[in-house]
Image: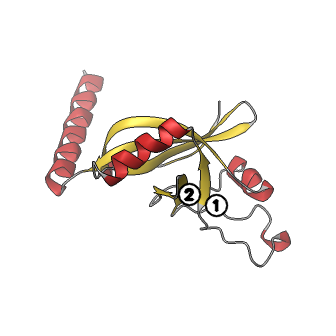
Amino acid sequence: MSNYASNKKAHFNFEILETFEAGLVLLGTEVKSIRAGKARLEGGHIIVRGGEAYLVGIGIPSFQPINTAKSYDPERARKLLLSKKELEELERATEHARLTAVPLSLYNKGRQIKLGFALARGKKKADKRETLKARDTKRDIARTLKQN
């Protein structure tokens, strides 16, 4: 299982509550581009409209820009393949519980490309400061243990 792209800022900006896995509806050139490691997940989120989930705000550039159609949009919304139960749970959480669905990683499972995403709650500025402080102290402890 190869990890093609990950959203490193998601764990810093959000408190991850529950994770999911979904398939994506992609074009052939997008699949090649993802496998080449060109996808960017930062700033993306998932919305539910009309009983379907869409991944918006991510960028997947064309694999070969010269051979790409002029109408290709790298920032277009991509449909997620989820079961009805997962869609209902996602819609309930984003609409009523005021949570955000954030993409975490793009990876393969067999020959298919999957999206790992999570229901998350945004962190406040003070929580982010605590995360930075804890990371710095952990780094200092590891550094002093390594020296001894």
Q: Quadrant of residue 58?
A: bottom right
Residue 40 - label? 2
Measured as percent of width and height from the top left, residue 13 is found at 31, 52
The residue at the far top in this view is 148
Query: Which element carries disc 1, helix, strand or loop?
Result: loop
Residue 60 - label? 1
Q: Residue at image x 21%, y 50%?
A: 128
Q: Residue at image x 34%, y 54%?
A: 95
Q: Give the alpha-carbon distance from disc 1 to disc 2, as whole Å.
A: 6 Å
Between 37 and 24, the one nearer to me in the picture: 24
Query: Which element carries disc 2, helix, strand or loop?
Result: loop
Measured as percent of width and height from the top left, residue 16 is found at 33, 40
Q: Amino acid at mark 1?
A: Ile
Measured as percent of width and height from the top left, residue 130 is found at 16, 45
The residue at the far bottom in this view is 70
The C terminus: image quadrant: top left
> Would residue 73 be found to the left or right of residue 136 on screen?
right
Callouts 1 and 2 close, C-beta under 8 Å: yes
Residue 113: tell me if it is visible. Answer: yes
Residue 127 - label? none
> Would residue 42 be found to the left or right of residue 146 on screen?
right
Measured as percent of width and height from the top left, residue 84 is found at 54, 39
Q: Is residue 105 above or below residue 49?
A: above
Q: Quadrant of residue 124?
A: bottom left
Q: Is residue 137 above or below residue 51?
A: above
Q: Residues within 10 Å of mark 2 (few under 14, many from 20)?
A: some
Q: Is residue 140 above or below residue 63?
A: above
Residue 11: tell me if it is visible. Answer: no
Q: Amino acid at mark 2?
A: Arg
